[in-house]
Image (cartoon, rainbow, N blue to C red):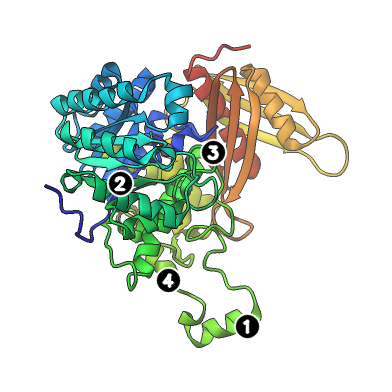
Amino acid sequence: MTDNNNNRIIIFDTTLRDGEQSPGATMTPEEKVMIAQALDQMGVDVIEAGFARASDGDFNAISNIAKKVKKATVCSLARAIKADIQAAADAIKAAPKQRIHTFISTSPLHMKHKLNMEPEAVLEKVTESVSFARNLCDDVEWSAEDATRTDHDFLYACVEAAINAGARTINLPDTVGYTIPSEYARLIQLVKEHVPNSDKAIFSVHCHNDLGLAVANSLSAVDAGARQVECTINGLGERAGNAAMEEVVMALRTRNDILPYETGIDTTHITRLSKLVSTVTGFAVQNNKAIVGANAFAHESGIHQDGMLKHKGTYEIMTPDSVGLHASELVLGKLSGRHAFKNKLEELGLELGDNAFEDAFVRFKALADKKKHLYDEDIIALIDNSAMTEKQVNKFVSLKVVCGSEGDPEVNLTLQIDGQEQQATASGTGPVDALFSAIKQIVPHGGHLKLYQVHAVTGGTDAQAEVTVRLEKEDKVVTGHGCDTDTLVASAKAYLNAVNRLLTLGATNK
Ligand code: KIV
Ligand code: ZN
């Protein structure tokens, strides 16, 4: 029996599964582990680590996550197919807490055109798939895909069957982002009222943002009795994305007077997670995005600034500190030693093994030599970026660039390929164009540039540049990262990182 009336909301993060389904948002297995560990530290209850049967890569990423996550339940998605469910169970088996999430479409449109199945056959599949999953795992979640466009009586029958077969969590997704808050709340209430065994399951919501209502719909469903919210960092996800976790959690916290629910999230991790996911995926966060946008806590107009000086509450409903956004403070310099560096990492919640710490310290010293003032953001970028770019087959060595308003820019680049240094010179319409041509000369790869993005880690002209490059070749899309105080060096590193990833995926050198 499950207590649906308590006020604890289970946060189910699907950044690594639904989030990764955003076109172009592919993440490497190492990056997925990094994000999963950060979500675990943040206090997420359930991490949907992927769809185990999608590919060997997905399976391995989920099993690596299962080995690393300490507190959260690790979950894998599975269609209502035995091989999918078995793969899910196998992938999560190293996790201390495991969940299988199986789903099937229940709306007339999906059953007819996508599944080509009669409702009776779908209902049988619900029982069959959930029972099979329950034999492999105690914690089973069942989702009625396209629930918000499903006939209510049929939905009640499916939910009852899933609970009878052993599902502990019932998810009613708004798969196409079609519903509105009042209608969704009513759906949750109706299902709870009409399904005789509804008290034996926790109700979950999973909202897509096609009409910009994903967060509002999720909150409305919570008020109607849902106790699990499925969401993603930065609202990443299919099409317009999923409900943004940071918005759901901060709305529950800030309006606790009328939304008296608790989550287990340590909200001070929000800013770091948002930056990490944005860097890894290359999906920039819009400046005016709630909670995590660059302007979310900025006060521009004179009247607002005046109000803020008199009392912060005039224009601020939550503090930047509460989401882990601190004013850039000078933290370390080139005289800081191992001890200070270690303390800083601990303070930032960054856990490194001994070898990784030594590597990071060497890179920190090199950065401190180049950049006088080092801030928290610099340290975070240094650690996150090196985790994303480790194990490079081809390495950056050096770069000389001549450019300006006279003549074509020229670059002279040296890379290390299989341990041997190779040089190329190239010109182009701009220095970045010339640089990428030089890399192509040394490492021909045939990938097409889909994204080139530069982001300054801190303010100031000596800021490190964090560059993201996305390359596409045939059906493969990769994202590369590079960070340096010199924007062109960062660009070279990011482009080379993307090329290395293409080569690792087995894309041919054409
Ligand atoms: O949007 C959706 O319906 C889903 C399900 C697989 C839960 O992502
Ligand atoms: Zn979804």
Labels 1 and 3: the sequence-earlier one: 3
Query: Residue 131 in the image: x percent, y percent?
Result: 18, 26
Q: Which mark is residue 204?
A: 2
Distance CA(mark 3)–CA(mark 4): 31 Å
Q: Which mark is residue 319?
A: 4
Q: Is residue 62 left or right of residue 399?
A: left
Residue 354 visible in the picture: yes
Distance CA(mark 1)–CA(mark 4): 19 Å
Residue where numbered disc 3 is placed: 239
At numbered mark 2, what does the secondary structure look like: helix, strand or loop? strand
Q: Are marks 1 and 4 in contact (CB under 8 Å)?
A: no
Distance CA(mark 2)–CA(mark 3): 21 Å
At numbered mark 3, what does the secondary structure look like: helix, strand or loop? loop
Labels 2 and 4: the sequence-earlier one: 2
Q: Amino acid at mark 3?
A: Arg
Taking the view exactly as shown, the residue that stands out farthest to the right is 406
Query: Residue 407 in the image: x percent, y percent?
Result: 87, 36
Labels 2 and 1: the sequence-earlier one: 2
At numbered mark 1, what does the secondary structure look like: helix, strand or loop? helix
Q: Are marks 2 and 1 in contact (CB under 8 Å)?
A: no
Specify few, some or many for label 2: CA neighbours under 10 Å numbering under 14, 14-19, or 20 or more. Answer: many
